[in-house]
Structure formats: structure tokens, C-alpha cells
Amino acid sequence: MSRPSPQRTRVAIVGAGIVGLILAVALNQFDEDQKIEIDLYEAAPELSEIGAGINIWPRTWQIFQELGLGEVLIPHFDHVPDLEPRPIYEVRKADQKDGFKVMDLVTKGGALRIHRADFQRCLIQHLPLHNSKIIPINSRCTLHLSHRLIDYNDPPPSPSNSFSSPVILYFENRCSTTCDILIGADGIKSTIRRLFLQRMDDPRKYERFIDPTWSGAVAYRGLIAREELGKVFPGHRAFDHPGIMYMGKNRHCVVYSVSGGKFINVVAAVHDLSKEGALWEGPWNVEITQQELREVFNGWEDEFQALVECIKRPTRWAIQNMHHLDTFARGRVFLIGDAAHAMVPYLGAGAGVGIDDAYILASLLTSTSMHRSPTPELMNNLVETYNTVCVPHANGMSKASFDQGHLYTLQTPQFHAYKEGDNVPMKMLLDVFQTAEKGWWWAVTDPREERRRAVGSLQNLKVRL
């Protein structure tokens, strides 16, 4: 399946979701010496995205600019990216008939929002495929659909301290192939993560990291046509606000426009602290009745009820996350995105952190002098640098996102005495959401500086060889 290429390092990316596609684009962009050959494997028979909106923060926008994606993405945004202070959500206490505004959450640059399908189409246009319009095509890339990985073998170095055998990949369709470096971008239910952890020196230590755990929350999702909402609730707040957060005790909902304002994305969540870490029984996402959604948010303010009335086919998702791994790479295998650190969505950062992984890993792989088959010493240095940079960053963001969810739903200790619909003093609400606003400090940090440090650390390790 993979084309023979004796002069190039063969990188296999398993999983063609957002993060896998970004990695392929980044490798091509940074591969000025044309030393990488990419094989992108996807289990599905076609590329498709589940979900609606995705948040792009100034930090991630800087990465996209470096990857040459700026021009194709800007038409999908409601404002030109900048660092001007912008509201990202109007926060409303909505779990009562007479809801009211608490405050605007404001960050530098605000949030750029795009429909996942639109985003994916932009990325596919920039894959370095044979029929791509991008110039230059540095990395050779082949996309393999209907290839579900079921196993891999990463033989250890030989006694002469070289890799005498490549990594071997096995697929459900009975195909097999080889590569020099394997990247697991296969999502929260990652097969590569399971195999990777089961092959650790102490696999029992990692048993609890193999499968995701339930966060104790479920999300109700829907996508509403703007004109439909206008019929039900003319002049709805969602039409002229960049985002709204309806919140109350143990529940909250974020609402914002996508696809140039044609649709309103609605994600409403219910949190149960007593269920954090419990096992979720049944499928993770199911279609539910509109009546079930009404009952969950019964008694909330009228403008929120209008949104519920417009979601004709709501879906319910169990929000899963991962225990924090202490390593994302070993041997010739790397984990990125949700395969490494699936997290709850309360900072809107899950995709962004996965993009950080791809950005750093592509920078490391293209900064080295490897040709064809990397040496064990080089792989050890790549693994050490990737883990040092990406593990603490991702785990820190995962914890921060979890903590943010507790703020949104008034589940911190000072609110324990309050029930749904209770009148909460405005000062308490302002205090908690001013704290939440500070949670986006990372959104304007500079990923280019982290890239420079990562590449510098790798070069220093090479010098010590």
C-alpha cells in the first residue's frame, strides 16, 4: 500500500479527524527538505465530521497562519482575527422564569467559530495529495479510507543499536503495511492507545488509562436554522451576540452562530458531581425526543425555551474524558489529540490542544536530519522532547477545563446551599464568572515560542550524543 521511497522517512498517521489532518498539513508545510512520506489511514469509508461548532482562539490562529491556512479560513469567520478585547459569551442566569444578565466574558481576540464540516473541507484542500492545488507539495501523502487499524508491531532496536525492522501495521480489511514512525490520532476510543499502554514495561500500572471515564455530565446538542428561530422568537439574542452562556445550578448551555450566521449551534450540559468517574452504561450518543430535552430544562427562561423548541432532533452525548497519562510517546509510536488526552469541553480547548500536539510533533520531525529510517538515539530524543513539551501542557489544560465546568454550573463550595432556580446574590455570580474569565489566559499565549524551545531542546539532546 505505501509507495517505496528509500530517501524519505515514512510517517503513518492513523485517524483522519481534525488533528490527524492538521498533522499532515503541518508536516508538509515544515518539510522543506522533502524528507517525509505520509500515509494517512482512516477507518471510515469517507471523511466526515460529527459535531457542529469548533472554537479557534488566537493561539491556534497563529498556528494556522504558519501552516498557510489563514486565507482559506478567514471567509468562514465573523470577524478578522486580531487581539482586540471581544466578548465570547454573555452570561445569563437562566434557570428561572425571569432570567437576567450576569456579565460579558471578554478575552483578547475573542473566539473564532467555524462549523466542523467547513473546517474539515479547508484542511482537505491543503493536504499534500497528488491532485492538491497547494504549492509546494513537500511531503508525499496518500489517504487510505476504510482502513481500521487492529494491531501494530514496533520491533525493538537490534544489538547493533539500529532498527533492523520497520513498524508493521495490521488492518481489519486484512491489509498490512510498514512505516518508520506511527502516529495515533484515532480519537478518544483509540486502538493505538490501548495497544501502546498494554505494551508498557508495567502494563498493570496503565490499565485505568486505556478506556475513557465518564465525567458525570451529559450534553444535549442541536443545530438550529436561523430563520426557524426567527419565526419562534423574533429578535432572539443569539442573532446579534457572538455567544451566549445560559447557566444555572448543575446545568449550563453555550449558544453561538456558525456557517456565516446561517445556523445556531446549541450545546447544553447537565452535571452530576456524584457521577464523576463512574462507568457510563450504553451508547455514548443517542437521539432523544424533544420532550425529554424540555423536561431537563423545565422552568428556564423563555428565550432559552425557544431554542429547545427549535431543536427537532436533539442528541444526548455522554461527556467522557481521560485520566492523565504521564507519557504520550515511546519507541517509534506517538499519541496526539484525544488519543492522548481527551478532555471535557468547558474551555473549548480540546481541539486546540490536539492542534498544539500536531504543531510541535511536526516541528520536531522536520527539524531533524533523519533520512529513511531514524536511529534509536534520534527516536529516544524525539520521544523525550515531545513528552517534555506536550504532556504537562495537555494535562494542565485538561484539569483547567474540568475546573472551569464547575464554575459554570455553580458547583464550587460557596454554592452548595443553593438549588436550581434559587436567587443567588449578584456579587457571588460576578465573583465566580470573573474567575472563569481568567481561565482563558492561555488563549493568547504564543505557540511559536514553544515551538522554538521544543526544537532547541531536541537540538541540545542531539549535541549530547
Image (cartoon, helix red, strand yellow):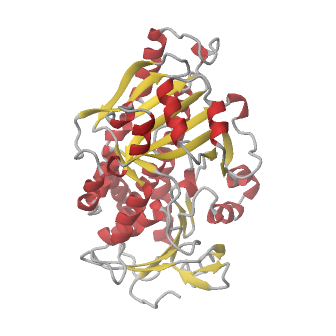
Q: Can residue 319 be seen by looking at this rendering?
A: no
Up-down relation of residue 256 to residue 187 (above or below) = above
- The image position of residue 40, as x and y in percent, is 48, 75
The reply, left or right, for residue 108 in relation to residue 2 is: left
Up-down relation of residue 77 to residue 110 (above or below) = below
In the picture as drawn, the residue positioned furthest to the front comes out as 231
- The image position of residue 215, as x and y in percent, is 65, 39
Q: Can residue 219 be seen by looking at this rendering?
A: yes
Which residue is located at x 73 percent, y 57 percent?
202
Which of the two residues, 132 or 22, is positioned nearer the viewer here? 132
Which of the two residues, 261 or 45, is positioned nearer the viewer here? 261
Q: How many labels does the image show?
A: 0
Which residue is located at x 43 percent, y 60 percent?
117
Which residue is located at x 48 percent, y 12 percent?
428
- The image position of residue 214, as x and y in percent, is 68, 43
Q: Choose top left, top right, bottom left or bottom right for residue 280.
A: top right
The reply, left or right, for residue 148 in relation to residue 461 is: right
Which residue is located at x 55 percent, y 10 percent?
423
Which of the two residues, 347 or 305, is positioned nearer the viewer here? 305
- The image position of residue 44, as x and y in percent, is 57, 71
Q: Choose top left, top right, bottom left or bottom right for residue 329.
A: bottom right
Image quarter of the C terminus: bottom left
Up-down relation of residue 23 to residue 279 (above or below) = below
Up-down relation of residue 432 to residue 278 (above or below) = above
The reply, left or right, for residue 62 in relation to residue 346 is: left
Q: Choose top left, top right, bottom left or bottom right for residue 200.
A: bottom right
